[in-house]
Image (cartoon, rainbow, N blue to C red):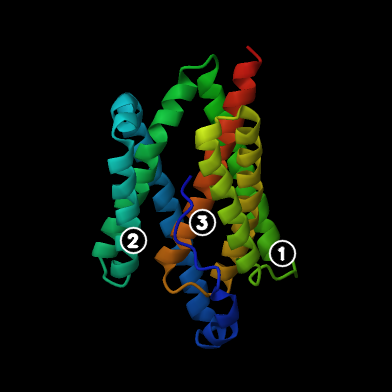
Amino acid sequence: MGLYDRDYARGGSFAYENTSRSDTQIISFVKETYKLFAASMMAGAVGAYVGVPMAGTIAAYFWPLFFLEIGLLIGLHFVKHKPGINLAVMFGFVFMTGLMLAPLLSRTLGMSGGASIIGNAFAMTSVVFGAMSFYAIKTTKDFTGYGKPLMIALFVIIGFSILNIFLGNPMLHVIISGAVVVLFSILVIYDTQNIMNGSYETPIDGAIALYLDFLNIFTALLQLFGIFGNNEE
């Protein structure tokens, strides 16, 4: 899971940040954020497309590639204000996330009806993401103060995920995947409201947050659809 780079304590700074930006600046910020999000989706898709034929190699070198992925994300934090370099690092990171997804995609494609499973997971992710984004914009409820509870939930999921590496319990894996879908669906609302408030430091921050929300929902749904679709055979 791409469970990275979240500042869950940002809720207390909204009033200051919102007053420091005009409505025009916030609108421009939102537009730029969603442009970068769309571009990130395409770069991630390219990474997955390139990675599927070499899924075995990627799986064999999982940990070096994983640390490279994390290194790019950490590096992005330090170069996000440097034009040109920030975009290169951002696209390098999202390309790597697509590459790292390739082994799961390859395994799914090896199942009966694997292409349909992937298509259905992507379609469902798009529906969930779109619905949560719409709700975030239309609701009068403020989710921006939920950072700490979301952080706790995230660490609980990570803890059980690590535990299940050793247990290998299929039912626990299903429960964890379901919890990931629920958590990151809420995070779509949280991140969308942050973006609409202009509360992220840069559009890159907001775009990466949305991208990771989408990626984690898709990955969890793909695992769930793969499990249940495979059991039907």
In percent of width and height, residue 131 lies at 67, 51
Q: Tell me the kind of residue under disc 3.
A: Leu
In percent of width and height, residue 118 lies at 53, 29
| Spatial separation of the CA atoms under disc 3 and disc 2 | 17 Å
Residue drawn at point x = 48 percent, y = 44 percent: 1
Q: Earlier in the sequence, mark 3 or mark 2?
A: 2
- The answer to whether the residue labelled 3 contacts the one labelled 2, judged by CB atoms less than 8 Å apart, is no
Disc number for residue 190: none
Q: Which residue is mark 2?
A: 74
Q: Tell me the kind of residue under disc 2.
A: Ile
User: Horizontally, is 148 left or right of 28 in the view?
Assistant: right
Residue drawn at point x = 67 percent, y = 67 percent: 143
Disc number for residue 138: 1
Quadrant position of residue 97: top left
Q: Earlier in the sequence, mark 1 or mark 2?
A: 2
Q: Residue furthest left?
A: 85
Q: Secondary structure at mark 3?
A: helix
Q: Secondary structure at mark 2?
A: helix
Q: Residue furthest right?
A: 140
Q: How many marks?
A: 3
- The answer to whether the residue labelled 1 contacts the one labelled 2, judged by CB atoms less than 8 Å apart, is no
In percent of width and height, residue 214 lies at 53, 48
Q: Secondary structure at mark 1?
A: helix
Residue drawn at point x = 32 percent, y = 25 percent: 56
Residue drawn at point x = 66 percent, y = 64 percent: 137
| Spatial separation of the CA atoms under disc 3 and disc 1 | 18 Å
Quadrant position of residue 9: bottom right
Of circles 1 and 2, the one toward us is 2
- Identify which residue, 94 or 131, lies in the foreground: 94
User: Horizontally, is 157 left or right of 41 in the view?
Assistant: right
